[in-house]
Image (tube, rainbow, N blue to C red):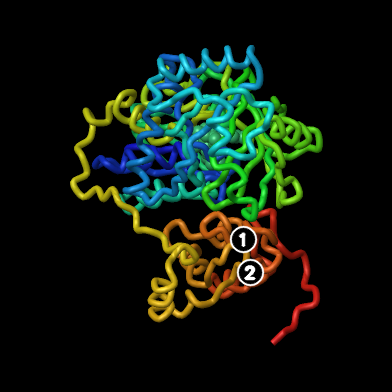
Amino acid sequence: MYDYIIIGAGVVGSAIARELSLYQAKTLVLEKENDVANVQSLANSAIVHSGHNPEPNSLKARLSVWGNKLYEEMEKELDIPLLRTGAYVVAHNAEEERQLEELTELARINQVPEFKILSFEEALKDEPNLSKTVTKVLSLPTTKVTYPWEVAFAAMENALINGVEFIKNALVTGIKKEFDYFVVTVNNHIEYQCRYLINSAGVASDDIAGLIEKNVPFHITGRKGEYFVIDKRAKGFVNHILYPLPTELGKGVLITPQYHGEILLGPNSELVEDKYLPTTSFAGLAYVKEHAAMLADNIPFNQIIRSFAGIRSTADYDDFYIKESLEVKGLFHLGGIDSPGLTACFAIAKYLVNEVMNVDNIYQLNPDFNPYRKKRVMFHKLSDVEKQVLIKEEPMYGNIICKCEKITEKEILEAMRGPLGSNTIKGIKKRTRAGAGLCQGGYCEEKIVKMISKEFNLSPMDIAYDKENTKLFTQETKVLKK
Ligand SMILES: Cc1cc2nc3c(=O)[nH]c(=O)nc-3n(C[C@H](O)[C@H](O)[C@H](O)COP(=O)(O)OP(=O)(O)OC[C@H]3O[C@@H](n4cnc5c(N)ncnc54)[C@H](O)[C@@H]3O)c2cc1C
């Protein structure tokens, strides 16, 4: 019997797992995918927003301002990447300047630190490619960029060393309450029991609620966002995140410098019927190009290396829905965790555990809790001297497998090993960035297939790009047999 079962290992489920590991409670995380952060937490803008635009007094406002601050702590404890860009929200004319004033008032009420209005000339000093049609900007210095997959890995790895259990490929298919405990069915046949159940299933959170509740208190609609990725050769094209003014569709198409040097253009915002199918479209990407061009001049569209889409879990409830079930005691919902869910994830976890579930009153603190996660080696970021020392200790650091991102054999091996290790091409890419650069895996994928094959004793025919149904090969082609 577990004390807690968490359904879903996105950034929110992973942050909750870590928060619960502070207590002497037995916690299990069930994730339907073969990895953490494979759905909403996989495909987003990666921005840690300042909290400048949610409705005052909403949970979104409170948890994003708090969450933004918590990232500073998590950088130290969990080695989470942070790029301190700051952000500019731009206005183009008198009417938009009036809206910018209103937004500034929201930022003030939400207690966003250090914001100020800048003239076009002041903003241009730091952003030479800012569109010449811009007249004023709202500067938000606390806005920053993280690396969302790493946020989930960091939180989950830390939860695991503090005693949490994690099962992947575990699709929750049934929930029953018997006496004072839950029976959670996975993949239609395996059962787990727990005292308290946490529904952190993102776009599926209403479907999970529907497995046990007659009247689900919120309904999720998918809202797709599409992106272009510009190669890191364009690093420095913009230094701040550039936002347009927000509309009822959200924060709009942005230009966002990424932690590892690329630049994201997007997202659009389109309601979709199938909330599980994040496909890109010609029309959506054309919209992204057109709207990005309103923020900056000379966008290097010729350096686009890929496009992708993510689907926001938008609820009919007008805020994050973080509450105990009205029908089933001990069941807790996290519904409608769309943007700023990445920003707020650590604050959401603390809010849920301390203010909604009051875990303090139920379980003692875990005296052995270790808040720190072992730092990952990013070989290419080291000085030449540090590199030489490492290569002497471990020659596999001297073998570069991914030339675009300069990822070494040792880093890839590390990504395959450990409790959160992976044996898929995408899993290795998420952990190391091998395959994320200019050639998009054209050079290194074949080498990584051989490494996975050796490490896990798998035939290349059995190696998947990502999910089970994405095997890389259907039959042998021209392979030299030794
Ligand atoms: C286009 C886009 C842009 C965004 N930009 C930003 C941004 O810049 N900043 C920001 O703060 N936020 C942003 N967000 C929002 C942010 O990405 C989400 O709020 C956050 O990732 C939500 O995390 P989560 O853990 O709740 O959901 P998810 O990451 O979706 O995790 C839910 C998990 O539940 C699992 N699951 C579902 N059903 C089951 C089941 N039956 N059994 C077991 N497991 C199950 C899923 O597989 C999934 O892994 C953006 C979102 C999108 C889509």
Residue 205 pos. (x, y %) = 53, 29
Count of residue discs: 2
**Mark 1 and mark 2 in contact (Cβ < 8 Å)?**
yes
Q: Which quarter holds ligand 1?
A: top right
- At x 48%, y 60%, the residue is 421
Question: Can you say whether 395 is above or below 322 in the image?
Answer: below
Whether residue 189 is visible here, answered yes or no, is no
Instruction: Tell which circle, 2 or 1, labels the residue nearer the N-terminal end.
Output: 1
Residue 13 pos. (x, y %) = 44, 38
- At x 24%, y 48%, the residue is 369
Q: Residues within 10 Å of mark 2 (few under 14, many from 20)?
A: many
Residue 316 pos. (x, y %) = 58, 17
Whether residue 419 is visible here, answered yes or no, is yes
Question: Can you say whether 287 is above or below 237 in the image?
Answer: above
- Marks 2 and 1, how far apart in space? 7 Å
Q: Quadrant of the N terminus?
A: top left
Q: Is residue 455 left or right of residue 267?
A: left
Residue 162 pos. (x, y %) = 30, 50
Please tell me in which quadrant of the rendered image residue 366 appears: top left
Amino acid type, callout 1: Ile
Circle 1 is placed at which residue position?
425
Q: Which residue is outermost to the bottom?
A: 482
> Is label 2 in a helix, a strand or a loop?
helix
Q: Is residue 218 left or right of residue 480?
A: left
Q: Residues within 10 Å of mark 1 (few under 14, many from 20)?
A: many
> Is label 1 in a helix, a strand or a loop?
helix
